[in-house]
Image (spheres, helix red, strand yellow):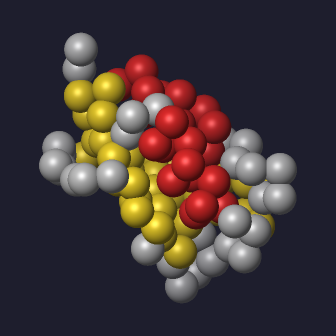
């Protein structure tokens, strides 16, 4: 079982629509740790760490987001492992 961390930037109508809350909920359902944070440019940054297949599942979910959002772009990169407790909303 391979554990990885991926940092993603989600663009579109993703602030003010519960995106971070839903992302944290999905991350916890997938046993991932990390955070979802609003950025000043209107994007949301998501750090997700855990089992590689679960990280990929959250990336697939982020590409659509919750029904209240309109995701127009998703970029991501693998980053160094970080030991984080839980999945926080920042």
Question: Is residue 71 at least partly visible in the picture?
Answer: yes
Image quadrant containing the N terminus:
top left
Q: Position of residue 46 (x, y in %)?
A: 45, 56
Count every numbered label the image shows and give the total. 0
Residue at 23% from the left image edge and 20% from the top image edge: 2
Residue furthest top in the image:
1
Residue at image position (24%, 28%) is 3
Q: Quadrant of the C terminus?
A: bottom left
Would residue 17 be found to the left or right of residue 38 on screen? right
Q: Position of residue 71 (x, y in %)?
A: 73, 54
Horizontally, is 26 left or right of 85 in the view?
Answer: right
Left or right: residue 52 compared with residue 61: left
Q: Residue at x 25, y 53 (%)?
A: 85
Image quadrant of residue 43? bottom right
Instruction: Where is residue 55? Give x, y as percent.
Output: 42, 33
Q: Which one is nearer the viewer's eye here, 49 or 41? A: 49
Q: Is residue 6 visible?
A: no
């Amino acid at each position: 079982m391979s554990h990885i961390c991926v940092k993603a930037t989600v663009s579109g109508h993703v602030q003010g629509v519960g995106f971070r809350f839903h992302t944290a909920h999905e991350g916890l359902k997938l046993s991932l740790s990390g955070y979802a944070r609003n950025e000043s440019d209107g994007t949301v940054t998501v750090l997700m760490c855990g089992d590689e297949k679960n990280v990929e599942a959250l990336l697939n979910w982020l590409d659509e987001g919750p029904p209240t959002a309109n995701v127009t772009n998703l970029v991501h990169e693998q980053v160094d492992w970080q030991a984080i407790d839980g999945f926080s909303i920042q």
